Image (cartoon, grey):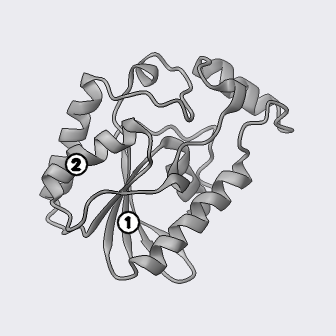
Amino acid sequence: MIITMVRHGQTDANYNRIIQGRIDNPLNDVGRKQAHDVGMHLKSLGKPYDVIISSQLSRALETAMIIKKYIHAKESIVISHHLVEREFGHLEEKPFEEAIHYIKTNPKNTLGYENDETIIHRVKKEIFRLYHEYPDQRLIIVAHSHVIKSMLVIVDPKLYSFSEHRLQNTEFYHFEVTENSIVLIK
């Protein structure tokens, strides 16, 4: 199975560097343009996609709907609640700099946000579930920064981390998933 994981387009919270987590913020106009641009780019690659999967949050779902206009996947968009953004607890709606400082200096996670191991386990379990459902297909998954970072950490935890690696809106990565592995395709 080949997966192209795309981060959703920009929201006002992204623009203002506010942690969203599971708050359901919509795309802004820049985010809609980014979604059109990434849709056109993915179409230009000339690779057919079978299924588009999205988190249930509107910023991801709207991005997926825009991309679908360019990709023409065979099925309707499939929602995966397991690919929703990290639960940031009390850090949601806080400025990014404040939240990242807390995360880096509080390894015991006393605010109760979803820790790295939990999100990695959740994402990995869902990716392998999708592999069993769509083993020989090409998928686009529209998700969130920490979902995609989970995949990158799974692939190479020495190269990628949650706190140091920054993802731009509509940045995407290609992965190959087999029965027992997830590999980043360069």
**How many residues crowd around disc 2 within 10 Å: few (fewer than 14), some, or many (20 or more)?**
many
Left or right of 53, for residue 44: left
Residue 157 x, y percent position in the rendering: 64, 57
Q: Nearer the viewer, mark 1 or mark 2?
A: 2
Tag 2 residue = 67
Q: Tell me the SS state at disc 2.
A: helix
The residue lying at 29 percent from left, 30 percent from top is 31
Q: Is residue 73 above or below residue 179?
A: above
Quarter of the view holding residue 120: bottom right
Instruction: Judge from the rendering whether residue 90 lies leftward or rightward of residue 123; answer left or right.
Output: right
Q: How many marks?
A: 2
Pick whichever of labels 1 and 2 is earlier in the sequence: 1
The residue shown at (46%, 16%) is 16
Q: Position of residue 47 (x, y in %)?
A: 19, 68
Residue 130 rendering spot, x and y as whole percentages: 46, 71
Amino acid type of the residue that numbered disc 1 sits on in the rendered structure: Ile
Residue at the spot 14% in from the left edge and 52% down from the top edge:
70
Please rate how many residues cluster around mark 1, counting C-alpha atoms within 10 Å: few if below 14, some from 14 to 19, many from 20.
many
On screen, 7 above or below 46? above
Residue 3 image label: 1
Q: Which mark is residue 76?
A: none
Label 1 secondary element:
strand
Tell me which corner region of the image, top left, top right, bottom left or bottom right, holds residue 29: top left
Asked whether the viewer can see residue 152, the reply is no
Q: Alpha carbon of mark 1 to alpha carbon of mark 2: how far?
A: 14 Å
> Label 2 sits on what residue type?
Ile
Q: Position of residue 74 (x, y in %)?
A: 20, 68
Q: Height in image: 164 above or below 51?
A: above
